[in-house]
Amino acid sequence: MLKKIKKIALIFSITLLASFLIIQLLIFNESHSVNITELQTQEFDYIIVLGAAVWGSEPSPALYNRLVTTYQFAKDNNVKIIVCGGLGAGNTITEAAAMKSFLINKNINAARIFKEEHSTSTFENFKYARDKIAPAAGIDNPRILIISSDFHLFRAKFLAQRLGFEVAGLPAETPPNTKISMFFREYFAVIKSFLFDH
């Protein structure tokens, strides 16, 4: 009986390690497999920028990097932008409101920026963004450019595809002091989203 328990424990451990390595490889590959010059030549219906923490009324470092990446891509074209994120605990403004304010201050035309202010998860970001796009544009399968942190793009892209989007991704750098922990934590988030976010 003890041998069987040890064998099961060994198989479980090997399976867990293998799944961790495979998912981390997928996350890492998605965080680097992008050609910005090529993306600039493609046509998108919308840019969707995923939210992150707001500190008071200012973007956190992770969100700041996402917004700088958004500005760098959006400043030379007229693609519409959806900024996603609801009201975090202790905040007075939504993530989306902080994001729109940042981009307006960078001289991105306010008329191009649409706020999705109700989501509290990545899946809801896309679900509620899709609700905004469909009636406005009549597009069944919108082609979107997702901008989020590098560790987040793999999960973001497969969730967006589940909801009918045609997707490309543009990664923003994760702040160095949180990079290792965020890549590690994302493994569990991927499994959770794969099983439950439908």
Image: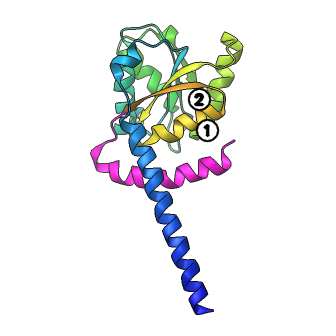
Determine crowd level at label 1: few under 14, some 14-19, many 20+ residues with C-alpha closer than 10 A.
Answer: many
On the image, numbered disc 2 is attached to which residue? 117
Tell me the element at label 1: helix
Q: Position of residue 81 (x, y in %)?
A: 50, 17
Residue 187 lies in the magenta-colored region: yes
Residue 59 left/right relative to 79: left
Q: Give the residues in magenta.
A: 172-198
Residue 177 left/right relative to 147: left
Residue 5 left/right relative to 90: right
Q: Nearer the viewer, residue 120 or 123?
A: 123
Q: Position of residue 90 (x, y in %)?
A: 50, 44
What's the residue type where badge 1 is placed? Answer: Phe
Specify how the rendered protein is coloured: rainbow
Predominant SS of the magenta segment: helix
Determine crowd level at label 2: few under 14, some 14-19, many 20+ residues with C-alpha closer than 10 A.
Answer: many
Q: Residue at x 54, y 84 (%)?
A: 6
Q: Earlier in the sequence, mark 2 or mark 1?
A: 2
Tell me the element at label 2: loop
- 128 above or below 191? above
On the image, numbered disc 1 is attached to which residue? 123
What's the residue type where badge 2 is placed? Answer: Glu
Q: Which part of the image, by quadrant, shows the C terminus? A: top right
Q: Residue at x 69, y 18 (%)?
A: 140
Q: Which part of the image, by quadrant, shows the N terminus? A: bottom right
Residue 121 position by quadrant: top right
Q: Position of residue 181 (x, y in %)?
A: 38, 54
The answer to the question of whether label 2 and label 1 lie on touching residues, with beta carbons closer than 8 A, is no
Q: Position of residue 64 (x, y in %)?
A: 36, 32
Residue 119 visible in rendering: no
Q: Nearer the viewer, residue 45 or 3?
A: 3
The Cα atoms of the two marked residues, 2 and 1, are separated by: 14 Å
Residue 85 lies in the magenta-colored region: no
